[in-house]
Amino acid sequence: MPEMPEVQGLVDFLHGRTTGLEIARVTVASFSALKTYDPPVHALQGAEIRGVTRRGKFLDMDAGTADAPLHLVFHLAKAGWLRWYDALPGTLIRPGKTPIALRLGFGDGSGFDLTEAGTKKSLAVYVVRDPDDVPGVARLGPDPLSPAFTLDAFAELLRGRRTQIKGVLRDQATIAGIGNAYSDEILHAARMSPYALAANLSDDEVAHLYRAMQDTLTDAVAEASGKPPADLKDAKRRGMRVHGRAGQVCPVCGDTVRSVFFADNSLEYCPTCQTGGKPLADRRLSRLLK
Ligand SMILES: [Zn+2]
């Protein structure tokens, strides 16, 4: 799943490439991906892109005018991606027979497809007058790289929360943009157990976690920026120290990276760096063994 750094990379790319261009055509190939009907999707046709911004893991393409606000907002979810074309193919898209969910063509012949692999479709596209009309956008917590997101603001979010820190970091309503991968990386950088309760962290631990979050995300955004969409996924994978690397060597201490189930997914961590050398109990596995 693309998270904040990859989405920021896509946003920077699209902002540079599409600002000022007119939308020549829009083709919806997956009707389940389109979540709104008013304004209609064809309202985008003929509209000019004014700019592209990020809201958490959502991309927001502003295609409005002063009199008629209009935004194309989308979320790539778990298996969605954006494929850019300098010259958009003219082939016919057959709904239901393609991974393409939506195709957008610009007046200069360029364009992109939003694609989604797999059978569980969750890529979501919205055509709205205000990005906050998208429930997932309206619910978003603060952006961790915004100037307002200070150490004090972070400490305030954690105060009294008897929730495992791993869950807090990836809760979009608490902090926007961090998912399963970067929460693993942030916790590894902070040398903190994913199971630590947010409310129990000392002031020093909160400060340490805050710095780890800022550094990890700032580095990943820098790594993603300026890359074309096709290179962003590999760049993300290459930058990971523990996430998706179970069984491999921790680059910090040489221990073996381990994996446990967490919520709807698995998480990766290094026992030596994060949990005093002790492997975390894998609740799903221990339940199966009973
Ligand atoms: Zn380690």
Image (cartoon, rainbow, N blue to C red):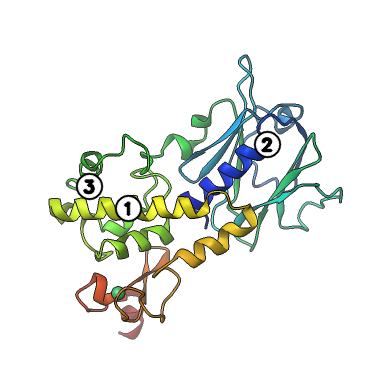
- Compared with 54, 47 (above or below) is above
**SS at mark 2 in the image:** helix
In screen coordinates, is 150 left or right of 228? left
Percent coordinates x, y for residue 239 in the rendering: 46, 64
**SS at mark 1 in the image:** helix
- Compared with 256, 158 (above or below) is above
The answer to whether mark 2 and mark 1 are in CB contact below 8 A is: no
Q: Quadrant of the C terminus?
A: bottom left
Percent coordinates x, y for residue 98 in the rendering: 76, 57
Q: CA distance from mark 3 to mark 2?
A: 39 Å
Kind of residue at disc 2:
Thr
Tell me the residue that label 3 is attached to.
Answer: 158
In screen coordinates, is 250 left or right of 200? right
Percent coordinates x, y for residue 47 in the rendering: 72, 26
Kind of residue at disc 3:
Leu
Kind of residue at disc 1:
Met
Tell me the residue that label 2 is attached to.
Answer: 18
Tell me the residue that label 1 is attached to.
Answer: 213
Name the outermost residue toward the bottom: 289
Q: Earlier in the sequence, mark 2 or mark 1?
A: 2
- Compared with 238, 207 (above or below) is above
Whether residue 240 is visible, yes or no, is yes
Whether residue 162 is visible, yes or no, is no
Residues packed near mark 3 inside 10 Å, few (<14), some (14 to 19) or many (20 plus): many
Q: Nearer the viewer, mark 1 or mark 3?
A: 1
Residue at x 14% of width, y 56% of height: 200
User: Would you say the beta carbon of the disc 3 residue lies within 8 angstroms of ligand 1?
Assistant: no
Q: Earlier in the sequence, mark 3 or mark 2?
A: 2
- Nearest to the observer: residue 40 or residue 287: 40
